Image (tube, rainbow, N blue to C red):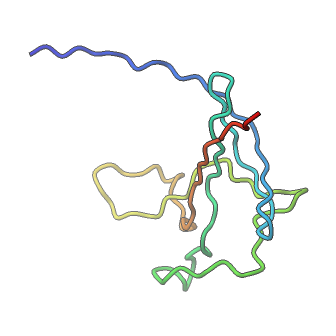
Amino acid sequence: MTLTYTPLPTISYQQESYHLDIGPLGHVEGLSVTSRGEPALHYFGGLPYALPPLGPYRFRSPRQLPPCYRYGTKVNPGRFTGGTGICPQPPNRTPLDPSLVDEDCLQVYYLTGIVPEIQ
């Protein structure tokens, strides 16, 4: 049996800042990704969905964000252009990079495809 390697095609893309008004939750900054000159998706990474499990709240049920919580303002939008925090894990054979681990890990990333406007 002979195995042959077929390289994957190179994908080129560009990213730029993207601001979104999310109503009463405020304003967020994410990324707009373009591939082959066409808009492909919007990305927001590290959006908190609950308060951080720090101090006495560690190993407890997540606490909801307060009703007055705002991700950012129009002038100073919440910046969500990176990844999410990785919760501390028990030791294993492949240790995580310590700079990626964060107790404040109750976050999600959100991707949305861009639907072209009908002319």
- Quadrant in which the N terminus is drawn: top left
Please tell me which residue is depicted at 86% across the width and 62% down the height of the picture: 73
**Residue 21, quarter of picture:** bottom right
Determine whether 113 is above or below 27 in the image. Answer: above
**Residue 70, quarter of picture:** bottom right
Please tell me which residue is depicted at 76% across the width and 62% down the height of the picture: 22
Left or right: 59 with respect to 36? left
Left or right: 12 with respect to 22? left
Please tell me which residue is depicted at 63% across the width and 66% down the height of the picture: 48
Residue 33: give x, y in percent of width and height.
66, 35
Residue 92: give x, y in percent of width and height.
30, 56
Outermost residue on the front side: it is 119
User: How many numbered badges does the structure rendering display?
Assistant: 0
Residue 59: give x, y in percent of width and height.
45, 80
> Residue 55 or 118: which is nearer the viewer?
118
- Quadrant in which the C terminus is drawn: top right
Determine whether 58 is above or below 31 in the image. Answer: below
